[in-house]
Amino acid sequence: MTIMSVVEEEEEPASPSARLMQTPGFDICVYAVLGYMTVIDVDLFKNELELTLVKHPRFSSLLIEKDKKRGNYSWKRTVVDIDKHVFVPDLDPDMENPDEFVENFTSGLSRKTLDPTKPLWEIHILNVKTSDANSTVIFKIDHSIGDGVSLISLVLACAAMHSSGGDLLPVLPSKKRKTNSIGDRNSNIGSKMKRLFLSAWTILLVVFYTLIDLIMLLATMLFLKDSKTPIKGERGVENTPKRFVHRILNLDDVKLVKTAMHVSINDVLMGVTEAGLSRYLNTRYATTEKHEKSNNNTLPRNLRLRAGIAFNLRPSPSIKDLIEVMDEKKELKGMWGNLVGLVLIPLTIALQDDPLAYIRRAKSIMDRKKLSLGPNFIFMLLKLLINLFGTKAALLVTRAVFTKTTVGFSNVVGPQEEIKLFGHPLSYISPTVSGFPLALVIHYQSYGNKLIIALAADEKLIPNPHQLCDDLQNSLQDIKQTVIKRGLVVMV
């Protein structure tokens, strides 16, 4: 007897985060724009979906409202009619400006809501050649189903089920484990005392940085807001039309800077973001009479601009576990869903003479944030508010924080090698979101040797998002060239 036959009539309570995502005024959807190397065979694509993705409990369940006042929901398994989820518009393969068409089509999806009478996802297949792919598939998924890390793990599990039945799994970058040397194993009393002191000091730093983060969060909820800039959204920005654009870069450039400066990928991307936003805002201010200056620097001083980063608090579900879930050999058991905390990162918006200053500052900030338990406490606070007062109370807190910040930031690690997904070779993955009370959300997604920058930008406040992509790309190149010129890395 399979798990499906045992639980098909039962309902599973939705998690606090999933309940929050369903609160009126907080309609958040995830979009995964998948570029393929070949034209999509629609029948093959649908068949692969039914053999993999549709077997996942969240993609074959309805979200049922149980208590409207408190925002209680539950998941109930149902039969999926694939033809009601996959849409294939009739397109002219020789159309003019196919890139613009795909961009407009994707952005247009943010103006429509998902049908709550069926599982909360849909797919649009666009068999038209663009500059980055021979066809494009757009997934629209309600954020209640899962976060970005979970969804990427599911993508890899689907690819593994297709390619080898789970015997050969796509490779994700792994964290290197430090090994103890013989000297460490035979350490003397002095070294033990040193480790004890460092442990105590680390605990003090964790407590200190956690308190600082919680104080800043409380201040943000009550009164502390970012400076008014051309990219700062106002109340109601979550409902305004968004433009989705992406840019594909070389991941090796990021790795080169990472190695040369002894920092993490996240540090490099945060530094590039700070540099790119500084360039973009400098250009925007240069076009206004109020901030015209005789030199090239038109940025106002002491701008307060912060990025909200969603920290994943749950280990990524393994590909093997997800395959067993889709094969109905295992239940989810808490390995899936939205388990994220929020951290606020201050960004220094300024034109630096030394491009590497952005990276050094980013590393300093990120090192401090890694020692903070603020995201954990924020998650527990929201969970407590939901359980005690319902989702509307948690929404007030969440909205109060986001509306006082400027930009969202996310970095999701993808497979190290190119994969075949739903029967077709994949060229790139470009994830983004709609429904956040922010005018700008920046996603970074790695795939093979590619780094994809994906922007969700308010169409009125940021009418030229491709310019921001240019500024982010040029900032990375400036940082890379500076590293090479200073001999910080040996070029082969």
Image (tube, rainbow, N blue to C red):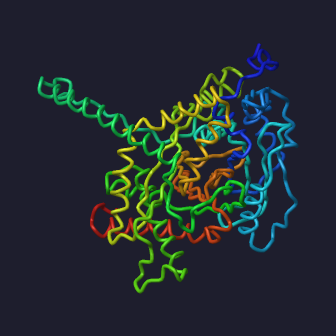
Residue 18 left/right relative to 256: right
Residue 130 left/right relative to 470: right
Nearest to the observer: residue 109 or residue 171: 109
Residue at 66% x, 38% y is 163
Q: Return the residue found at the far bottom.
A: 294
Q: Is residue 156 above or below residue 132?
A: above
Counting labels gives 0
Image quadrant assignment for residue 481 = bottom left
Residue 343 left/right relative to 260: right
Q: Is residue 187 above or below residue 412?
A: above
Image quadrant assignment for residue 89 = bottom right
Q: Is residue 399 above or below residue 247?
A: above
Residue at 63% x, 52% y is 437
From the top left corner, tell me how far across and down residue 165 is, in percent: 66, 31
Quadrant where the N terminus sits is: top right
From the top left corner, tell me how far across and down residue 118 is, in percent: 84, 37
From the top left corner, tell me how far across and down residue 335 is, in percent: 59, 27
Quadrant where the C terminus sits is: bottom left
Q: Return the residue found at the far front.
A: 223
Q: Is residue 103 above or below residue 419?
A: below
Residue at 85% x, 67% y is 92
Nearest to the observer: residue 141 or residue 298: 298
Nearest to the observer: residue 425 or residue 214: 214
From the top left corner, tell me how far across and down residue 82 is, in percent: 85, 40
